[in-house]
Amino acid sequence: MQRTKVKDLLTGAEAGKDVLLKGWVRTKRGNKYVNFIAVNDGSTINTIQVVADANNFTEEALKDVTTGAAVSITGELVASQGKGQAFEVQAKTIEVLGKADPEAYPLQKKAHSLEFLREIAHLRFRTNTFGAVFRVRNTLAFAVHRFFNEKGFVYMHTPIITASDAEGAGEMFRVTTLDPINPPKTEDGQVNYSEDFFGKATNLTVSGQLEGELAAMAFSDIYTFGPTFRAENSNTTRHLAEFWMIEPEMAFYDLKMNADLAEEFIKYIIRYALENNREDIEFLGQRLTEEDKARPQNERQEMTLLEKLEFVVNNDFERVTYTEAIDILLNSSHYKKKKFQYEVSWGIDLQSEHERYLVEKHFKKPVIVTDYPKDIKAFYMRLNDDGKTVAAMDILAPGIGEIVGGSQREERLEILVERMKGVGIHEEDLWWYLDTRRFGGCPHAGFGLGFERMVQFVTGMGNIRDVIPFPRTPQNAEF
Ligand code: ATP
Ligand code: MN
């Protein structure tokens, strides 16, 4: 007999037939006449109820059917008499494929804290919450590829090991095969990386953008979707040392086209998740609503998770320049009451409290902030005619802050070289990057979306560690 997944059993398509199901026991309850076993196999948040009649199954036969055990069950799929489910399985055979000692199994019926579950990340997939989170993550990843594929973008695999440290000075993980205790040294006592595996110092990439730009100069529209690494020691709920980033890069795009694409993209993948993971998102929303009840009235969310997502999908993002954003902050009663911890003035890098004020208090929707001061942005962003700002854009999302960072790129060789000098990057190190400005360069633009921040936004999970299967953060690389 072919196995049927729980998701398909629950549609009732096979009602009246004998079925084979496999999965993990969530609960078993019953009395001396009958036992009810709830089985989940990860295909859906729902469980299938298996009814084991005492006439067919002795207590002894069911003794290893405990929470967490892997089981293989045959029986007839029938309409359920009980409430809570439309269909159930009247068991004929039950085989325990893998026991789970009830004394030792860490997942109990009671709700566990997210912090505790992080310590048993190898088992947390089996909870409703993490089942839902990672099914949504999967759907979003698929939607990313679907969106760009439909638009004719080429998926580029940019390198994970890189010799350019143009972007992430000080924030990179070194990749080396040199003996850490006794590395070869140069005459002046430095580690001699010319003897290292690649003949030069190499690191894990912080972004695929520079290589992405090279490909865009041939394919017009490309995107990357891969892991990136940052050795920043920021222990926040929005930073990981290893995270996934989506970086489209488009030839012949200006900043406005770039922002339009980013907005369309974000709406598309959220809509796709709403259509394909409704039950999971509803469950996660209920979780948040429960959590919210414990908060004082004035700190509660104005919208449920579903309402928030539908609002984002159905409304235009707000667009303001950095200069306008600073004015909004300076004129806010929040500022006048001295409620910002960090100073506000033209030229500052917006702090997360400023970003959150703009999206959560002022506009109450996602905001695209453009045209930042050049001194706080990367060297490759295109210098505006005012000479002070660059064609940058950040997209800020409620509850998250920055979710996208992007820009129109500087395509003018002399200005680009000038800006590199300004930040101490040697032309020789990026000769290949500069070549694209020498040979058929053109206006182009792109952005980077932090995938985990997107998953946080759609699932409502407060901590980024809970939306990646095995988080890498300072002092933590377990599993
Ligand atoms: P932040 O100011 O929040 O640290 P950033 O300015 O360093 O972000 P970018 O370099 O523009 O971010 O990276 C592009 C996107 O990657 C960000 O908009 C964000 O969504 C995501 N991102 C950046 N750093 C991290 C991180 N450490 N962990 C997870 N996602 C990140
Ligand atoms: Mn950062």
Image (cartoon, rainbow, N blue to C red):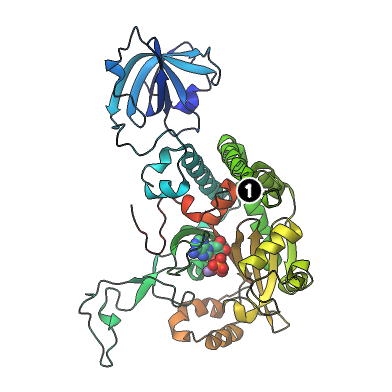
Q: Residue at 66% across / 65% down in the picture?
A: 355
Find residue 94 and report its horizontal and vertical position in percent.
32, 18
- Residue 237 vertical placement versus 309 (above, below): below
* Residue 354 image-quadrant placement: bottom right
Query: Which residue is at the front of the view, 199 or 338?
Result: 338
* Residue 381 image-quadrant placement: bottom right
Q: Residue at 47% across / 27% down in the picture?
A: 47
Query: Which residue is at the front of the view, 206 or 50?
Result: 50
Is residue 448 found left or right of 478 in the rendered image?
right
- Residue 62 vertical placement versus 239 (above, below): above
Q: Is residue 248 visible?
A: no
Residue farthest left in this picture: 182
Query: Which residue is at the front of the view, 29 or 471?
Result: 29
- Residue 84 vertical placement versus 315 (above, below): above
Find residue 5 and report its horizontal and vertical position in percent.
44, 27
Looking at the picture, which amino acid does disc 1 mark? Arg
Q: Secondary structure at mark 1?
A: loop
Q: Residue at 78% across / 67% down in the picture?
A: 333
Name the residue carrying label 1.
Answer: 295
Q: Residue at 41% across / 42% down in the picture?
A: 124
Q: Quadrant of the N terminus?
A: top left
Is residue 285 found left or right of 330 in the rendered image?
left
Find residue 54 and report its horizontal and vertical position in percent.
35, 10
Q: Is residue 124 visible?
A: yes
Query: Which residue is at the front of the view, 114 or 320?
Result: 114
